[in-house]
Image: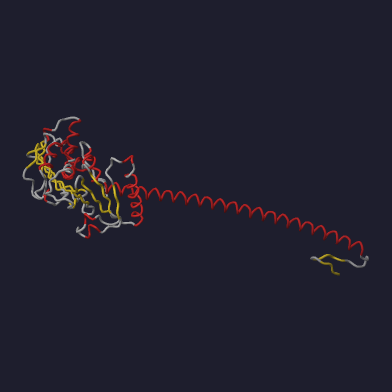
Amino acid sequence: MACFERVSPALKEILLKLYHAEKPVEIDHHLYEFGCVEYHVQSSAADPQNNYLSISTPLLSQGALLSCGLSSYTTQMVKQVCSDAVEIVEPAKEGYQLTLKLNLAKIPRGKDSYKVITQISSVQAVILCSQLKEMLRNVNSQDTSQGMNKPIKLVYHPREPFYVIRQPQKITAVFPMRFKEHSDVIIATAFFQELMDVGSSEKWAKAPPCTWSPIPPPELRGEPLEDLSTNGGFVSFDISSRHVEGKKLDKTVWSLLNFYAYVKKHVKGTRGFIQRRMQKRLESLVEVLHKEKLEENEDVRKFKGKVFRSFMLLQTKLKKRTRASSILLHIETPDDVSYVLMDSGLRNS
């Protein structure tokens, strides 16, 4: 999967064009992004200063915590991020969780305008993060309305849900891992085991403890079978109060939301590294074999050269002996008899 981004690049581009437009424009644009996110941008030439941005995003949990739409905590987080140029419209437009009224005239000029529009473009990430923050920041709460050891299924992408489980003094996040290729399963499994080993070391004692199991943890017993059918096992992180203090809360939430992306990026990078190493090794072997073949051909050439020289030397010696024998025969035979040497023997003519 793609990494979950704080700012929507496409939405940011549309808002910047709308902001820098020299004359009022009519816009009624629907924008769809990763994770079943939909933006609806509306602008009227009759009222150019007031524009509307509606957002439809999958709620992380469909449980009691968020059964009435956006919680007051999430709404408050949205208000903190957005500037005075943004007003929350209540109720939101039908089919959307949030509708914002944008007054472009209140956006400051210069570099600050870019910053404000960037903040507005990050509102979907704010909604998603605030929902998980609301769960994690109450890690030590004694409120049992959500139930202890009761899994809450969180979904921001249909194919990659994960679970948050309230337990005494901690919250456990469980990620069912699925991969298309068997080779990816092998790489990921080795990575998870290494993650456990590193996490248990003294150097990383303050990090959330990590565990991996090929079978679902007991807390997920009773969950739908399709959610528990995996080929990569289950990775769990135990989140305690020290992991959500101050600025750590935002980092912890962001790490959990991007865990799937991080794992798949690691698997992809490792697979590419292995392929490059194998290719390099293959090239080295081919080079060695080619060199040996050249040396072998050189040896054969030298051997053939020696044989040819030996053969030529032998022929030369034979020719010398043949001439000598012919001369002796002419000297020793009578004058009325003539002999001619033909082929390799002597005969009368």
Q: Is residue 190 above or below residue 321?
A: above
User: Residue drawn 16% across and 50% down?
Assistant: 148
8 and 273: which one is in front?
Answer: 273
Residue 349, by quadrant, is bottom right
Residue at position x 33%, y 56% from top?
Answer: 181
Name the one closer to the observer, 202 or 115: 202
Residue 300: quarter of image: bottom right
How has the structure been colored for display?
Answer: secondary structure
User: Toward the viewer: 292 or 212?
Assistant: 212
Q: Quadrant of residue 98?
A: top left
Number of numbered labels in the structure image: 0
Measuring from the top left, give residue 284's x and y in whole percent: 50, 49
Answer left or right for 236 relative to 348. left
Query: Observer-nearest residue: 317 or 343?
Result: 317
Identity of the residue furthest to the top in this view = 110
Q: Determine the residue located farthest toward the bottom in the rendered image.
A: 348
In percent of width and height, residue 215 lies at: 28, 57
Q: Is residue 130 left or right of residue 271?
A: left
Q: Point out residue 131 in the picture as x, y percentages from the top left corner.
A: 16, 45
Residue 333 horizontal side relative to residue 152, left or right: right
Q: Position of residue 110 (x, y in %)?
A: 18, 30
Left or right placement of residue 296 versus residue 307 in this view: left
